[in-house]
Image (tube, rainbow, N blue to C red):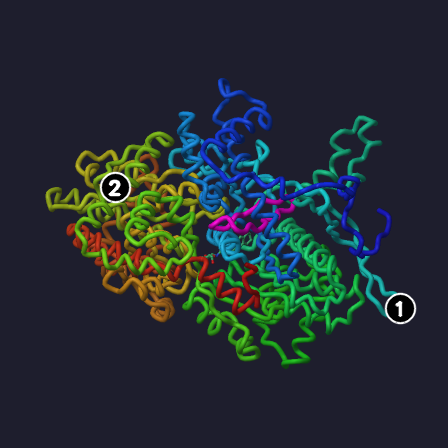
Amino acid sequence: MRKTRANNRGFTVRGPMSERLQVHNVDTDALELPEITAEGFRTSLLHHLQYSVGSDPEHASKFDWRIALSYAVRDRAISPWFRATRTTWDTDHKRVYYLSMEFLTGRLLEDTAINLGIFTIVNEALTSLGLDFHDIAEDEPDPALGNGGLGRLAACYLESTATLACPAYGYGIRYEHGLFKQGFDHGVQIETPEDWQANDSPWNFTRPEAAYRVLFGGHLEEENGATIWVPEQHVVAESHDTPIVGYGGNWANTLRLWAAKPSAKYFDLNQFNAGHLARASFAEALARSLSRVLYPNDTTDTGKELRLRQEYFLTSASVQDILRRFLATHDDLRKLPDFAAIQMNDTHPAIAGPELIRLLIDDHGFEFETAADIATQVLGYTNHTLLPEALERWSVDLMRHVLPRHMDLIEKIQHREIELHGPLEPATAILDNGHVNMGSLAFLTSHRVNGVSALHTDLIRSDLFPDFNERHPERILNVTNGVTPRRWLKLANPDLAALITEAIGEEWETDLDRLTQLAEYADNDDFLTVFGETKHAAKNRLADWLNHHHDIDIPVTGLFDVQVKRIHEYKRQLLNIFWTIARWQRIKRDPSAGWVPRVKLFGGKAAQSYVMAKDIIRLINDVAAVVNNDPDTKDLLQVVFPPNYNVSMAEKLIPAADLSEQISTAGMEASGTGNMKFALNGALTIGTLDGANVEIREKVGAENFFLFGLTTEEVAQRREEPGHSRAAIEASQPMRDILQAVAEGTFSPDEPHRYGNLVDSMWNSDWFLVASDFDSYDEAQTRVDEAYQDTRAWQKASVLNIANMGYFSSDRSVREYMAKIWNIDSAL
Ligand code: 26V
């Protein structure tokens, strides 16, 4: 390849499509849509069906209606979107850039209609046509562009920035295939490719004018004392925008997702014409591979070069876009921190520090010192996990091979830190033992580093970065996670939302602390009766959906006990299924002991390569097969595991839950956000003192929370005790009975030793302390049973949970980011 200098300046890929034409005599005000009415909306919908979709009402499919409806709703999102863009430019307002490898937005149709305040009118228009809004909305594919909590948090935060009129962009990757689709074959997880882009999304706006080259590989040269990067390859990052409308419809922010495209020269026309079809497309395929798949692994550093390339692809395109936007109206890049705040969602975009420094030096002539100062003032880093296996480390060789200039700058960043603040501990140095620690790099190139719950932030200070905390005592702070009450209450649980509005009036949607007024109703019989009906309705909806989509029948009378999240040993689905086995054994021993009927619901995916997590899934399904078909127990205990848990499924499961399982080994779950969604919908929590559980329990009151288990300190001590697992099992009759049943093949009669490894690891290591916490969990579950039998008392506790959840609105979290990290005000 011809030598090119890595000068990104003027490298915005601008084709004829981005040429701006001069126009005259346009009155943009005249383009504003008229005030919405059901009649007018109906006309607009029929118009889109005919002229945008090309279908007629007599023959239109659900898909056709969904697309037409999305266009009709989307029309209404444009003016808040334009208003936001214009206001930000006109007032030269600071902007936030949220860089994340994952965004789990969920479906957009109903959410956008709710936030625009047109849900009721749209519903009316559809009803007049004999159509059902929810039914049509369910046709939308749920974009699975993330693994779990980190990606869903990014989506909640973007929606909250829009609600608060905080000018913000979410930057991510437009993966062709999101997280795999999960199916079960005889209880075993099978993965098939997800295909959310099978049809064009009406929410996507492709922006050919905003495309950038992202450079890779090559080598460095010295020229007049300056370092020059001579890259070997490049791909083009093409932007795809989605408007994210804030509640109230006053403001919309942009989710900008990058798609990797080869530059035209990658397609070898000579090869093609010579008949070498595959060879002609090879380079093209390589370029496209950058946005082909989401890494389906949320715990381990896969060490895959492609992953590093993806991270750089996201980061470089975003940082170039950020600089381009700043330079459109400014010329002094030293002012960048006054106009841009970049938040790194975990370390995945941590190459942003070196990338920004590189662009400032190589394209804009800054000295390293100044460039590093500017970058540090602009950047913030959120840590989302303490699990050692999830902390990103790249080998120096790989980093130098893929990004030679960045490797050079990383060395300079480490050197600068040592010059300014003294030598670094090897364990937390950026460069250690031939590796680059991305957490340390992110920390030392950020002005603020935050954890996601009070406990987690304490552990960041004491365990993850104790030496950095001494060197930079002002840098670490806590911002406890939050969730958006629009999606997680108003959209997911419309009956409960309506009841709340009836009781305390509007505006809790944007001022969630108002929920405290519900406490007055906690003893009100009439209120509690209706409240009970909303829970029952949610259970019925879930039961209908399970029946219709998964051919699963569940009774709607029992206690719905739900654990939905990624499958991971530290989250301890094993503890839950072990207890379920104990329950089954107990019912069989004493069938008429007055058992509270339970429906045990599980949901979640295991990383493809995570053998133990897949064993746990299989065990849950194996237990379900035995328990659900046992005539002695099936009316009292059901185990249900619908496949392919995602945002849309969460919207159905969470409102129906009575009990929320938040049972991770203390000290291991950074925050959790499912815990907040459940409590907001009135489920009571059975949980450990881990992540945000600690704060939830403080807010809702210890008497309304089923606490169990070892504390973080006790976990550390217990792990030091030799033989702790054997001792705990031997001391617990139920634990022994459970493990015996599993070991004997009670749940795998066709293969009795299927769970041999799992049982062995329980006896011999049990790192996650399932056995140590079992009796305490069991005792808490007994308290759950007792409490559930007093319906009124349970409902009261449930209402008090909701009443005290105001703090966990993502609006509160985003306000904290705005004040303490981004230094930005609302623009309205
Ligand atoms: C790591 C990796 C490593 C390489 C392959 C892809 C990949 C994807 C994700 C991760 C780290 C995931 C960390 C994460 O999701 N943490 C969760 O963040 C939530 C939001 O703060 C929090 O509520 C959960 O407790 C925490 O586990």
In the rendering, at what x and y percent does residue 313 appear? 67, 51
Q: Which residues are magenta?
A: 240-258
418 relative position to 619: left or right: right
Q: Residue at x 49, y 18 (%)?
A: 58
Question: Closer to the camera, 282 or 468?
Answer: 468
In the rendered structure, which disc, 2 or 1, sits on the residue that comes first in sequence? Answer: 1
Residue at far top of view: 58
Residue 665 shows in this picture: no
Q: Residue at x 17, y 44 (%)?
A: 587
Identify the residue position indicated by label 2 in the image: 536
Identify the residue position indicated by label 1 in the image: 224
- For badge 2, the amino acid type reads His
Residue 483 vs 466, above or below: the answer is above
In the rendering, at what x and y percent does residue 518 appear? 27, 57
Residue 612 vs 166, above or below: the answer is above
Label drawn at residue 195: none
